[in-house]
Amino acid sequence: MITHIILFKLTDPTPQVIAATRDLLLSMDGKIPQLLHLEVGVDLIHSPRSYDIALVTRFGSLDELSAYQVDAYHAGTIIPHMRSVSSSIVSADYESPY
């Protein structure tokens, strides 16, 4: 199992932008067949080092993660939106037991 985590620092982290962005990320559920787990969290602490939104996804293999990256909905809708609303994006990918 591969866990793929992305953190987004939004340019305009208003409640409206956060909610719309969270909802868009959650809209991937059921649209991308390789996606085994989808979790979206909104930061509660708001410290100087905090990011605003966390995306945690899981895939059965690296090949499935690669297919997700180029999936039409992900590449055509999600990525352009996230780039347009984010000032910084960081990620980590690792093999996990679940």
Image (cartoon, rainbow, N blue to C red):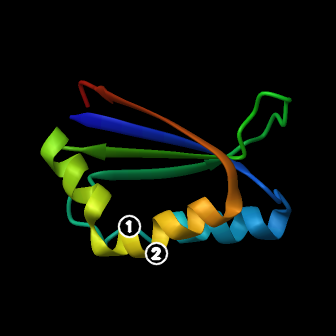
Question: Residue 82: which numbered mark, if any?
Answer: none
Residue 76 seen in the current view: yes
Identify the residue under disc 2. Answer: 77
Report the disc number at residue 74. Answer: 1
Relative to 68, is 54 above or below?
Answer: above
Does 62 sit above or below residue 47?
below
The answer to whether marks 2 and 1 mark residues whose Cβ atoms lie closer than 8 Å is yes
Q: Residue at x 52, y 69 (%)?
A: 80
Residue 10, percent from left and from top: 74, 53
Which residue lies at the image location 55% right of the left edge and 52% below the top edge? 40
**Figure check: 1 above or below 32:** above
Front-lying residue, 40 or 51: 51
Q: Is 9 placed left or right of 59 in the picture?
A: right
Q: List x then y, in percent, for residue 20.
A: 68, 72
Residue 26 visible in the current orientation: no
Q: Residue at x 22, y 50 (%)?
A: 66
Amino acid carrying label 1: it is His
Residue type beneath disc 2: Thr
- Is residue 64 shown left or right of residue 98? left
Would you identify the image quadrant in which residue 29 lies?
bottom left
